[in-house]
Image: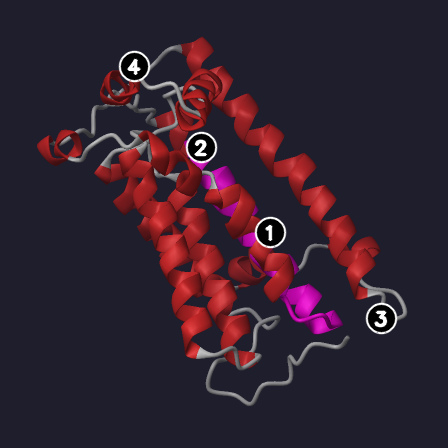
């Protein structure tokens, strides 16, 4: 394993204070969750608005198929599943052991590093999402909670952070880490299928909500897959062909 890879994804010293003491895993998970939220979400929001202020777009990744995909306001609930399902499910699936917490930290670092890479690309080669007129047309005459949520989202999430889709790359990484934990903890096949299907729906909702182009989905997926491969090679994760010792400690 290259040294840079280990330095990037192995647990950083900053996490040491948050590691479980006397097997108090749940308290540790709470502190880790709070630190992650107050770090990652404001960073993305600030970046999004800075790009609007700069007002620069260097490419248009739109293809004809982008406009052939219908705008579906109701799919906003699936799109927001990244926040009400994908991120929270990590805390449910993570093995409640010290080793489990270490693997969660590696996963969160991977999400954070991918966010930083995406932000760098956002500034170097920003691309505006120019599909929202389709969603605006779909909202005409629609007076539902879904429509209100979409209107709020359009107002808050400015259309400048196009590629690679952070929504997609994070879903891919969460699928990889969740699948690893579910296999080792011997979850039934149907649970793993439902888990993967839900994340896949969230990924494709980036197109039906007109938040992203197909190009954004593909590049975000590629970045997420590459990051997942590096993540699962870390010592904090057990290879899938080894015996499981990640059973939950209640």
Q: Secondary structure at mark 2?
A: helix
Query: Disc number at residue 213?
Result: none
Mark 4 lies on residue: 141
Mark 2 lies on residue: 120
Q: CA distance from mark 4 to mark 1?
A: 34 Å
First of labels 2, 4 by sequence position: 2
Mark 1 lies on residue: 88
In the rendered image, the vertical position of residue 15 relative to residue 177, given as above or below: above
- State if disc 4 and disc 2 touch (CB < 8 Å): no
Q: Which residues are magenta?
A: 94-120
Q: Quadrant of residue 204?
A: top left
Residue 238 is a magenta residue: no
Q: CA distance from mark 1 to mark 2?
A: 26 Å
Query: Disc number at residue 23?
Result: 3
Q: Secondary structure at mark 4?
A: loop
Q: Residue at x 39, y 62 (%)?
A: 196
Q: Secondary structure at mark 1?
A: helix
Closer to us: mark 3 or mark 2?
3
In this rendering, would 175 be left or right of 201? Answer: right
Q: Quadrant of residue 11?
A: bottom right
Q: CA distance from mark 3 to mark 1?
A: 21 Å
Looking at this view, name the residue that lies furthest to the left.
64
First of labels 3, 2 by sequence position: 3
First of labels 3, 4 by sequence position: 3
Q: CA distance from mark 3 to mark 2?
A: 38 Å
In the rendered image, the vertical position of residue 106 relative to residue 138, given as above or below: below
Q: Residue at x 77, y 75 (%)?
A: 250
């Amino acid at each position: 394993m290259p040294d840079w890879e280990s330095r990037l994804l192995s647990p950083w010293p900053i996490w040491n204070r948050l590691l479980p003491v006397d097997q108090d895993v749940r308290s540790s998970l709470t502190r880790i969750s709070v630190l992650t939220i107050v770090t990652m979400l404001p960073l993305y929001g600030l970046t999004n608005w800075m790009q609007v202020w700069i007002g620069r777009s260097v490419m248009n990744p739109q293809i004809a198929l982008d406009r052939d995909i219908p705008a579906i306001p109701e799919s906003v609930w699936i799109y927001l599943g990244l926040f009400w399902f994908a991120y929270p499910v990590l805390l449910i699936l993570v093995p409640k052991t010290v080793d489990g917490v270490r693997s969660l930290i590696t996963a969160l670092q991977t999400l954070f590093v991918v966010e930083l890479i995406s932000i760098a690309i956002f500034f170097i080669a920003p691309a505006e999402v120019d599909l929202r007129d389709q969603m605006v047309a779909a909202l005409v005459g629609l007076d539902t909670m879904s429509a209100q949520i979409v209107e709020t989202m359009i107002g808050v999430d400015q259309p400048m952070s196009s590629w690679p889709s952070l929504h997609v790359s994070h879903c891919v990484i969460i699928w990889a880490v969740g699948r690893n934990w579910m296999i080792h903890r011997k979850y039934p096949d149907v649970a793993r299928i439902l888990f993967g299907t839900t994340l896949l729906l969230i990924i494709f909702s980036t197109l039906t909500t007109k938040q992203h182009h197909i190009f954004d989905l593909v590049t975000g997926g590629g970045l997420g897959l590459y990051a997942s491969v590096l993540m699962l090679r870390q010592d904090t994760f057990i290879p899938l062909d080894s015996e499981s010792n990640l059973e939950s400690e209640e």
